[in-house]
Each structure stands twice: as structure tokens, then as C-alpha cells.
Amino acid sequence: MSKLDYNKIGLKVGLEIHQQLNTSSKLFCNCPTQLSDEYQYTLERYLRPVLSETGEVDIAALFEWEKNKKYIYRLPAISSCLVECDEEPPHKMNEDALLIGLAMTLAFKGNPVDEIYVMRKTVIDGSNTSGFQRTSIVGLGGYVEDEEGVISIQTIAIEEDAARKIEGKTDSVTYNLDRLGIPLIEISTGPDIHSPEQAKRVALKIGQMLRLTGKVKRGLGTVRQDLNVSVAGGVKTEIKGVQELDLIPKIIEYEAERQLKLLEIKDELIKRGVNKDFILQNYTFKDITNIFANTQSKIINNELKKNGKVYGIKVPKFKGIFGIELMPDRRFGTEVSDYIKVFAGLGGLFHSDELPNYGITKEEIEKVKNELNVKEEDGFIIIVGKKEKLELAINAIKDRLLQALEGVPKETRAANEDGTTRFLRPQPGSARMYPETDIPPIRITNSILEKAKKIIPPTPEEKMKELLKLGLNEELAKQVLVSPRLDTFDYFVSKYSPKIPPTVIATTLENTIKYVKSEGGNPDLITEEVLDTTFNAIYNGEISKDSIAEILLHYSKNGGDIKSIIAQYQKLSDSELEKIIKEIISTNKNELLSKKDKAFNIVMGRVMSKVRGKAEGKKVAELIKKELENFT
Amino acid sequence: MLEGYRGLALDSLSSINADIGDQIEIIKNDMRLKGILMPSYSSTDDIVVIKLDNGYNIGISIKNAKIQLLQKRTQKYKNEEEKNLGKSEIKIISTGGTIVSKIEYETGAVRPALSAEEIIQFMPEINNLAKISAEILFSILSENMKPEYWTKIINSVKKAFDEGNKGVVIAHGTDTMAYTASALAFALKLSGPVILVGSQRSSDRPSSDSAINLYSSVLLAKEAPFGEVVINMHGESSDTYTIAHRGVKVRKMHSSRRDAFQSVNDIPLAKVLWQDNKVQLLRSDYIPKRDETEIVNSKFSDKVFLLKYYPGFSSDFLDYLIENKKVLGIIIEGTGLGHVSTELVDHIKKATKDGIFVGMTTQCLFGRVNMNVYTTGRLLQQAGVTPLEDMLPEVALVKLMWILGHETDQEKIKTLMLTNIAGEINPRHSIDLFPRWNYV
């Protein structure tokens, strides 16, 4: 796709950054913020949507509610208590989490609210045992500076993380309660971002500020970005759960493209004279199972074997529309297909712009067209499955087609790995929020603000000075400062420095991992735990720091047990080294005698080729010199 | 009305003629905050609470801030009228409590249901089980329950059965539910089951236990073969089944869990499997239904005291109760097998001589009193204390209130206290009647 002119199309992007906080206990109870797979007990629960005062149920909440879906909760002994089980009211809000929220508000130059009200945000997909997430705004306003302009901060909220999903089946979902209640900070920017690259920069910048507090969790799954994207004439679309920063520009690009294409479709439909009434009157469907009695299509045959039906839907004046590509490999037909996957539980659909294909023949198509009375300018859809599901699908498709007349539907979407997105659910309204009456309002006093001020993160300039002071050269310090591993660096420095010099730690994090990748290793395997084990072995004198690169490369290529790999690189003792040196000297005696002035270099080269990674060069040289002194 | 506001915030809001629900704007520092004015739960008087567009509430101090009214509230709540639902099979009597409370989404305040329809709205599926009618008797929190309200409930239950209902469900707060259950059990001879039900998680949350508890209770009221008062609540923390405990053998044993209610010294009457629409009886020796429901006195005396004995308890308290408060009966929650300090023996003797009934229960809750094992017990019996078998202290208290409501004869009082009227005395305790914890 060609690059878009983002100014011209009026791109607006807002970010919501969620980051787990590394507090000693959870937000509303005294459980540690620690994940654990060990459990002895489980609970089985059901959730029901609750009517609001006006008799309405929040649309997103209702959508999530699947009747009679059973939620199974695993209760890990070390990280869950009655509060996670929804069997005890929440305790007071964790003060450290609150302070981090206030400190970040101050760091962004925003305004802390004077009194904090904890709210319940209805979530009934089972990820919260209570059926709601507790969340509270602690700060408003403030800004982040970016080279393309200032980005406003709208709100800073402190909230609880959801339970960890283990598996989903058709009639039940299993969660682990370990993650439920871990404090999260949510930082929402205004829709002031105007280019995909800017979005990534701002996300990086906010992430860096969070890491600079030294109080956030590290590692995979501890940070999540949501994107709110719109173009002029489009609609703010929420894109959930982006874990990789590098994907942000692509997702935004694709989303902008999608909205533009949807707007084009809208214009085209209007041009063709399609309106709401026209669709409602001319959208017809029929049971066309008999046409496919002897079909070669595997997909259809599989469903027919399970007593499924085939329905054909005539979509007047839609010829060519379903085939319009909105994002790479995702057509308008795919968007419609998403709806029936989500609303009707069907696997997908066939549309007129992609047939004949999938084993459906031209003859079958002709029969379908005849049966449905499809004219030249019309489109059609074929769906297969259980009758009840098909009925649901017919309405879901109609709804989506009607929305095509408006352009971009109000959706919450999920990011795919390739940067495209898919429909997840309708967007929630404010009806899903009501006060958490179990927690009294929290007045932000001056003494609380004073405490918060003490943990305001240093500015990047201040941090830079600190890094230089640790002995990093300027280039390395700059690398560390912008690195997502900044807090990992701080952690290892506090744990292993000065015995392991900060420069070694920084080089490992910033350069060795890149080296591993360039050599064909998988850098994702090098987790903080792996690094910790490696540093620990250096700290204890078991291995030489020179062997870090080789150990990590070995591990990232082959996996396995890091401890046993480290064992292979165990440092040789002085006497073992001496033995090797003596052996090499004696087997090369003649050569050495003939080139006496080069003897050191020869021995050094041969010994090192044998002990590389297991001994430090300085030590080897020292020992060789000693041995050669006696050599005659 | 500006609910919860006072002082500075009240003055500011009154001055711009703002009401709860109005759109207002607060201008402070560099912020302009628009939102809906909410009631205040603040402990300070300078906070104004608004709901932002995104649904969040925040509190802003009105000090150094400007405030203005943007728009008056338009939306009005519907006030549903109570309709006559005609002849029913099951009657739901509401006395208040969490189970029939609704949240006002805008304010977060919890209020009791106002109409029969609202009660049925909590779980419309109950209409598939039976024809339901509902009555709002009162709307109180259960800690505010009084014996005179028990009398009203008793009359209401009698009326419900007289109208032809097969069973009665009573929505009640859980804190004092067991007391009400005992009162009903003693005062009513029943032609059908009376099910007391509540909830431990309020109805406004998707995870509330109220819907399943209510559904199971309607099912039980329709299908149970007994003419007894039971408390029907979650049987475990999971939403798997409910347990119908005999009203005179049950206690709330946990402050917050769904399965807080436990039978003590007894096996519950039934298990209700709501998903299978099935009532599984756990015992056959229940009190059967009678042809007609009868009230056996519905007056309760308030001249009764429940005394929990503890080391150092001063006999002055006892003397005070007798001389100043003119109590007619005392239930002692004694130690172990049924003891209090021997220093109290003479004071108790004086009381019983004056015609005050003194009964002994155990603060152990589990097990039976036996006042023959130790000398103290024998001395207390000689002083006129009546050992009350395995009766729970609260049950003995309610029973005595009920007896003293209609009986003055000393011997008859004692005989009635020891007569097993509603299953409150279990003469046989088997080995399985004591909960054990498994430590790994």
C-alpha cells in the first residue's frame, strides 16, 4: 500500500498504556503480586449482566455475557485469598500504587484529583470474579513532549489487573486468579498523535518514564498498549492489547487505510442508491442446502455431515463490495465474516466476490444465483452450519451491512500478529461504570503528595548523568537510557555491581542480545531469568564474563537448561590451566625452540583456542609467561 | 436535594442552583472539568463529586475553583406501581436486605426494591418455575430487625398460605436471618415450606449470589415436602448448589463468604441443584406439611437477655439486669459444658428464686451442655439453671422470648424450653456433625 498523507486524512491517535506495578502486595488485598501455577482449589461461577436504573444493560457488557457460560477459577495458594475469590470485600487501596499514580501525574505536570473515587467497570467475560474491574482516576491533564509537538495526557488511572486466562471452551473458561488484583497504571493520552511513527515514539517515551520510576514490573505481559485511531470522517476505533511497540506504526497505518476504504465503500453504496430501507426490504435469504447435496467442497460437506444447513443470502447492489481489500489479506467480506464468527459462532462465510473457489463449482454458483434471484449488480453470501447459528448470522450480517452505510462502525478491535486487526466487540458506554461502594473516597492530602513527590522519576537527563557515573561510555549510556530494558539494567546493577561492572551488564543487555540475534539465535529465549542465572554464575566466580556471549548464543540456538550450559563454560582452575599450558608447550617443544621470540604468541593462540570462554585471557597470559620463564 | 453535601461545597452548589444529576463545570488551575454532579460520600466539606464523560467519578476541592451550572438534569426515574399479580403458587415476602436491593447506577447508592415487579426482575427465570406474587412488607437492613417485625412476618406468612400459596419465600438480610428463622419456626405450624433467603454479594454485581439463591428458594418452596422454616443459601463458594438449613439449627458463620450459613449440631434438610431444577432431600425426618397454617402465639417478650460469660465477668452486671432492667429470663452462653464462675452462683440463685428463668447454652456452639460433669455445673443446677441441651444460644434466646410472650408459669416455661418444638434440639450427635479442617 502506498504511504498515506496522514495530515490530509486527519489521522488522530490516542494511546492507553497499561503497566503492571511492582508493589509488594496487590491493589486491594495483601496477596503478593506474584504469578503462580500451583493450586489446590478451584471455584465454579456464573455471571449475569445487571440491569441499570433505567432498565438498560451496557451493550458491551451484554455482549460479553454468554448465557450459562461457566467460569472456572484456579486459586493459587500463594497469590490469592478471599478477596480474589469475591468472597471478602476489598481492603484499602495499596498506598504504593497510589503514590506511583500520583508521582507519574506530577512527572507529566498534570493535576492530581483532590479525592479519589474507586469505580466498578462492568466486565463479564469472567476475567474478574466480581464481574467488574476496580479502577480510579488519580490524575488529570499534563503532557509529554515529542519532536512533532506536545501530546496531552488525559487521565492517569490506577486499576486492578484481570485474572489470567488459561483455556477457553465452548461452555466454560478457565482462569488463574494469580494476576487478578495486581496494580496497573493506565496512562491515556489525548488524540493528539498525528502519525504512526509518532505514536511509537510517544509510547516509548511514556514507557521510559514508567521504567525510570524503578517501580514497575519487568518482562513479557507486564505492559499493554491500546490504540484509539480515527481518520477524518471515520470513528474512534479502539485497538486492544498491543504488546509489541514495533507493531504500533503498522497497526495504525492499516487502521487508517481500513477506515478510508470503509468510507469509500459508503460513498460507493450511496452512489449506487443503496440506503437503509433498501437493504431492509431487499436483503433476503433462503435454505439452499439441496444445491450442495453432492458438493465437492470439504467445508460444506463437513457441516452437512453434522446435520448443518446451507443458507444463501442475496445482498442487492453489493457486487464487488465484498472483495474490496481494507487491509492486507483482509477484505470487506472478512469484516462481515468477523461479525458472524463473534456473534453467531460460525467459522466464516463465502461471498460472491471470491467464488467459485473452496471446492464450490461454477455450476453450483449458477444454481445459487438462480435460486436467490441474484442480478448482475447484486452480491450474495453463503453460510454453512447449525440452523440456530445461521439464524443469528443472518441478523449479524444485516447489521454489519447497514453499518457500511455509515462508514466506520464503533468497534473494539484486537491486534493480529501481522499488524492487521479483527473485530472483538462493540464499544462500551459509560453505563458500565458505577461507584465501588465498599471503598471510601480517598482524600489526597498534602502529606500524601509530599510522599509522591519523593518518587517522581528522574528526567532522562538526570538518569543519563547517573549512567555515566556508573562508568558507561556515552554511547552505551544512551543505548541503555532509551532501552526497554532500562529497569532490568538497574535491577542487575543493584544486584551484581560492582563485582560485575555495570558496563558488562549494559553490554550484555544492549549488544550481546543483538549479537545473538545476528548469529541466528532466538533472542526471545533470553529472559530475565536466564540472564539472572548467567550473571549469578559470574558473580560467584564459576564462569568468566568473557563467556557470556557464547553461553547466551548456545542457549538461544538450542534452548535446554541454562544451568547445564553454564556448567560447560565453567572457569578452569589455575592448576587445570597450567596443565593445559604445559601440555601445549611440551607437544610444540621443537617449534617453540626454533621461534623463541614468538613463543609466547604461539602458545597463547593455541591455549586460547582450547580454553576460550573458560578462562580469562589476562590470566592465561600471566600463566604462560610464568611457564615460559622456565622453558629452555 | 444535594445529598451528602454540607459546608463550603453545599454553599457553592446552592449558589448556582445545582442539583444531583445536573451537568456542571468546575474551573480550577488550568483545568475545565465537565461532568454530572454526584452525591458526596466525602468526609470533608469542600469536595464536589462529578462523573466525567468516561464514567469515572472524581472529587475536586471547591477551594480556589469556579463552578458553573451547564444543564439541568432531564432524566427522571420511572416509578413503577405495584400491580396485583393475581393468584399465585409461591409468595415472595420482602423484608429488605442485600438480596432485594438495587444499585442506582448514577449515584452508586443501594436501595431496596420498591415493587413486586422489581423483585421478580432480579431473576425473571423464576416465572418459569411457578406463578409468583410478591409483597413488600418492609425495607430494612437486618441489623434493624425487631421482635415486633417478626410478628408482622408471621402474620404475613399465615396470610400467604391462607391465600392458597404452596410455599413462601422471605427475602431477608443475612446478619439476623437466623434469629427471624427461629422466631417463625416457633410461632408457626405450617402447611408448606417457608424459605428465608438472602445474599452475601449485592444484587448489583454480576457475580451476585442473589439470583441463584432466589431461584433455588422458589424451586424449594414449590417442591419441598416439609412444613418447616429453612434458610436456603449457597452450599459452597462455587455456584453449584444451595443448602436448605433447618431454621433453628443454623448460624451465619462467616462475615462475607457466600456459604456463610452452616448447620450446627445437625444435618441440613435439603440440597437444591438449581441447574437441574432438582431438590435433593438430605433427611427424611422433617416436619411434614399440615393441612392448614396456624399461628401459635406471635408475641415476643423483650425482657430477655443473652449473656456471654467471660473470665472476669462481674456479678454487678447480673444484678443490674435483674434489678434495673427487670428481665424475666436470661440465656447464658457459658463456657465448655455450660459453666460460669462459681462466684456467680449465689446471684443466679437469687434470680431464679425471684422467678427469672435462667438457661444454659455453650459458647462452643458445637456440642451439648452437660452440667453434671463438674462441680460448678451441679452447683449452677442447684441454683436453678436449666441446661438447654445442644440449642444454639440465639435460638434459645428467641425461644425464650416467644415463650415469655405468652407464658408466665415457671414450670411450664421450663418444660417448654426443654420440649423439642421445631427441631431445635438434636438428641443424637453423630461423629460427622463437627467440621474438620484438612491441613496438608
Image (cartoon, grey):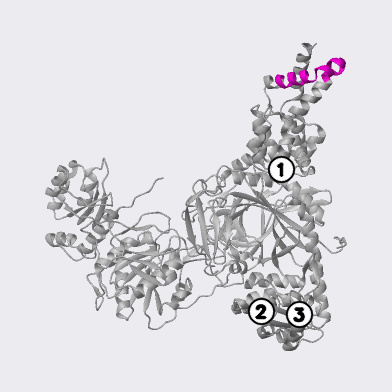
Residues A559 and A7: in front is A559
Q: Label 2 near label 1: C-beta < 8 Å?
A: no
Residue B37 drawn at (x, y percent): 60, 62
Mark in front: 1 vs 2: 1
Residue A167 as seen in the image, left or right of residue A266: left
Task: Tell me where the magenta segment starts and ends, as one range.
Answer: A578-600
Where does the image place residue A588, in percent across and percent down from the top left?
Answer: 80, 20
Circle 3 Cα neighbour tier, 10 Å, few/some/many (<14 / 14–19 / ≥20):
some
| Residue holding disc 1 | A556
Q: Residues within 10 Å of mark 2 (few under 14, many from 20)?
A: many
Compared with A174, A448 (above or below) is above
Would you say residue A594 sits in the magenta stretch? Answer: yes
Residue B198 placement (x, y as % from top left): 40, 64
Element assignment for label 3: loop
Tags 1 and 2 on a common chain: yes
- SS at badge 2: helix
Q: Which of the chains bears the disc numbered 3?
A: A
Report the residue marked by disc 3: A361
Mark 3–mark 2 Cα distance, whole angstroms, equals: 23 Å
Residue type of the residue flagged with mark 2: Ile
> Pointers 3 and 2 in contact (CB under 8 A)?
no
Mark 3 vs mark 1, CA separation in Å:
49 Å
